[in-house]
Amino acid sequence: MKLVLLLSYLLLFFANGNSQIKVTEYKINSGKMTFRVNFQAGNLPDISFNENQRSSPYFDETLGGQLVLPEFDLFLIIPDQDTRSVNGTVISQKTESFSPAINPGAVKKSDSLAILNWESVIKKSPRNTIDYISVAGSFHYRGNKVLHLIFAPYRYDKADSKLRTVIDYDVEISFPSVIEFSDARLIRKDDFPQDGLILNPEYAGKFAVNRNHIESNDTTGNWINYNAAYVKLSVGRDAIYQLTGQDLINRGVQISAINPAQLRLINRGEEVPVYVHGETDGIFDPADYIEFVGSMNYGSPLYRSMNPPNTEYYSYFDLYTDSSFYWLTWGGANGLRAELYRPDNSVNTPAIDYYTQVNHYEADLWLAGFSSDIFRNESPFWFEKKSWWGNPIFVGKQTLNVTASDVFPGSTAKIFAKYQSLGGSVTTDAHNLVIRFNDDPAVVDSQKGNALDQIFLSGSVSSDSIKTGTNRIITENLQTANTANILYNDWWEIEYPRRIKAVNDSLVIRFNQLSASDLRNFTITGLTGDSVMIWKSGESPKKIYGQKINGEIKITDSVGAGSKYIVNNGLRILKPKINYVKTFNNLRDLQKDADYLIITDNKLFEAASEHASYIQQSENIKTKVVDVNDIIDEFNYGYHNPEAVRSYLNHAVNSLITDTQFENF
């Protein structure tokens, strides 16, 4: 049976300034939804607007220099399907002689003050909007899929100074399947906005919603066994780490229940191969231990390149924390184990004389964005010019002292530096930077940059020019026509060839100078202690047993670009920090619904629970208190950043059976 639903009465009435939009003749017919938009235009400010018109709601400072031709947001509850097409037809319009005003631009006066520039606005061409109706996106809101439409009723013809305004406009939305209705309960009237924001609020809860579709993009919890215990560990540097059975006992873990073969270590949802000492007897004793290679929490591997627009800034360090988080668990399947490797040094292979030592220098002193749009700078989102920055450089020189040791001669070293422009009085070639090394007047690299751009400097020097001890990287900001010639440093680096010599029986070895992997050998020198531990890190880590002869260990292995080896003194081995032991609360459980949600830190959890109990009894609504650490652990693998809270709230709003009405932080 074909279902036809016709509502000829008013479904939507709202005002934007003194404009009014009505939506009538709303229909659902098989796989289509149709409705008519009736637009009653308000009084737009014209090109000769006076002081009193500056309060007009139609001005938009984010569109500085463009004509005041406002657009309107329409929100419609739709079936939980992908829209196949959104089309419209102009039914009626009016034409009048009218020249719209121009939006003012925002001008930054200081870090805390911006003003609107009404006098010297650059007149730009009108936006060439083709469609009167367009799709801005869709989202799930309180268990319903909502389509966000943009309605652009105005067209301005500069040639004849005519403004054409749509009055009636028919919209047709097509779906790939017949629209189905849900047998789920209707949402109470007070559960959904009735203020005109949603076109059809009475359809909240009526369309069948595919909850699996809502959750399809969330994979951060796939690794969790909600019936198992987990120990949250953290490390802050690239090194070999050990965790003993006694360490677990000290944190309340009953190790007698642990089958050591089932010990598993997880990082960012992926299992990490480890070595477990003493697991062959099937008992995890206090003296037994788990050994693994831990890594600092780095940022983007593209940090030496320039960002394309609308991407998160390529930062060397993670934007929130240097620590990496690992989860130790047990029970179920056996865990992954690292290869135990004993090199065969009798094979004749090419020898590697040095490795690539990278010294990175960065002072993250303050956070700022450097977009020309100050509103974008203050948004809560990261973008290509928003990060942590170091010291400023004015016209003149900026010097960094860098250290080097055991430099391999007759080879090439590299110097890098990255800067961000603060802006300037001119746009093109606002800056001119050069970089030099030590006392050599020769320029290693020079780059010009426009206002608000990034400048990346890189060049090569002979390794023979590197001194043992202190060296200097010198950046000079040359005078230009820019009267506000200021940049901020992000970081410096020196990358030089270094002999494979340990320092206090420890070393991090990277062979960045190599290309394809091949069977090669290298010798670690400078070893003085009797206990030296060596691992090869990566996707297939190896615990290496090498024979020390006269303070040296020779290793024959498949070595190539990116190969990384960790050497540590076995008597000073590091321990990971044990943050806590827990079982996950399963915040994704659809039965754990709430009308009133409180997110708090564990130090305030008891007080928040008392408040939630009071709200539940006094208001007769369901409440829920969530520890923010549980959100971080379950929705971001234990890594601390606010995006985890955003992901959880998205889940809570979209997937809980009872739709959350309030969030309290």
Image (tube, rainbow, N blue to C red):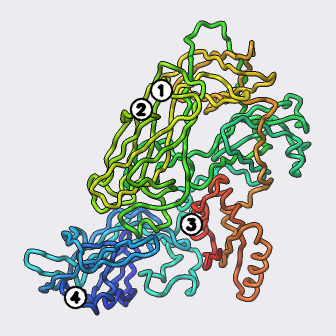
Check disc 4 and report the residue beneath it: 49
Q: Which of marks 4 and 3 is nearer the N terminus?
A: 4
The answer to whether the residues at label 2 and label 4 have Cβ atoms under 8 Å apart is no
Disc 4 on helix, strand or loop?
A: loop
Check disc 2 and report the residue beneath it: 440
- Quadrant location of residue 105? bottom left
**Disc 1 versus disc 3: nearer the observer:** 1
- Of the pair 78 and 455, the residue shown nearer to us: 455
Check disc 1 and report the residue beneath it: 465
User: Crowding near pointer 2: few (<14 within 10 Å), some, many (20+)?
Assistant: few
The answer to whether the residues at label 1 and label 2 have Cβ atoms under 8 Å apart is yes
Horizontally, residue 120 falls left or right of residue 397, namely: left
| Image coordinates for residue 432, horizontal then vertical, percent | 32, 48
Q: Compared with residue 10, is residue 187 higher up or lower down, i.e. above or below?
A: above
Q: Looking at the figure, which quarter contains the N terminus?
A: bottom left
Name the residue type under label 2.
Asp
Horizontally, residue 262 falls left or right of residue 107, namely: right
**Disc 3 versus disc 2: nearer the observer:** 2
| Image coordinates for residue 73, horizontal then vertical, percent | 37, 77
Q: Earlier in the sequence, mark 1 or mark 4?
A: 4
Name the residue type under label 1.
Ser
The answer to whether the residues at label 4 and label 3 have Cβ atoms under 8 Å apart is no
Cα separation, mark 1 vs mark 4, equals 67 Å
- Residue at 36% x, 54% y is 453
Name the residue type under label 3.
Asn
- Residue at 24% x, 74% y is 121
